[in-house]
Amino acid sequence: MKYNIVISEDAYNDLEEIIRYISSNSQYIETAHKFKKKIIDSIFSLSIFPKRNRVYIISENNIKYRSLIINSYRIIYYIENSNVNIIGIIHTSQNNTN
């Protein structure tokens, strides 16, 4: 089964903020664009086998959030029917369970 990828506005904004931060120094602009591609490719790879990553946290309403680590960033998502819902991208040093 191939899953649909749904990227929330928050996750999209997280990614844009990360890329802005990396490219804030002009010598890292190309690095930022390569990293953005790596994140996007990783997100869309979840359409094939999204359960390959462990459950990160279970919410009060029993949603099982999973995470995919890319470099120092955690892509947080949950699976609902045939959709993989990407809800955020955070640095692994953040302890964000919200």
Image (spheres, rainbow, N blue to C red):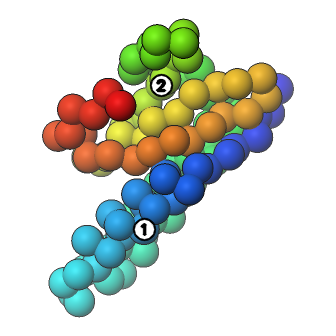
Q: In this view, does 24 lie to the left or right of 1?
A: left
Q: Is residue 33 left or right of residue 21?
A: right
Q: In this view, does 42 lie to the left or right of 35?
A: right
For label 2, the SS is strand
Judge the density around disc 1: few (<14), some (14-19), many (≥20) Cα neighbours within 10 Å: few
Query: What residue is shown at x 40% (from left), y 17% (from top)?
Result: 57
C-alpha distance separating marks 1 and 2: 21 Å
- Point out which mark residue 82 bears: none
Judge the density around disc 2: few (<14), some (14-19), many (≥20) Cα neighbours within 10 Å: many
Residue that protrudes farthest toward the right in the picture: 1
Q: In which quarter of the image is the N terminus?
A: top right
Query: What residue is shown at x 32% (from left), y 46% (from top)?
Result: 90
Query: What residue is shown at x 49% (from left), y 52% (from top)?
Result: 11
Work out whether residue 60 can be spotted. yes
For label 1, the SS is helix
Amino acid type of the residue that numbered disc 2 sits on in the rendered structure = Arg
Q: Quadrant of the C terminus?
A: top left
| Residue annotated with mark 2 | 66
Work out whether residue 38 can be spotted. no
Query: Residue 59, image x and y in percent?
Result: 46, 16
Query: Residue 12, image x and y in percent?
Result: 51, 59
Query: What residue is shown at x 80% (from left), y 33% (from top)?
Result: 2
- Point out which mark residue 16 bears: 1
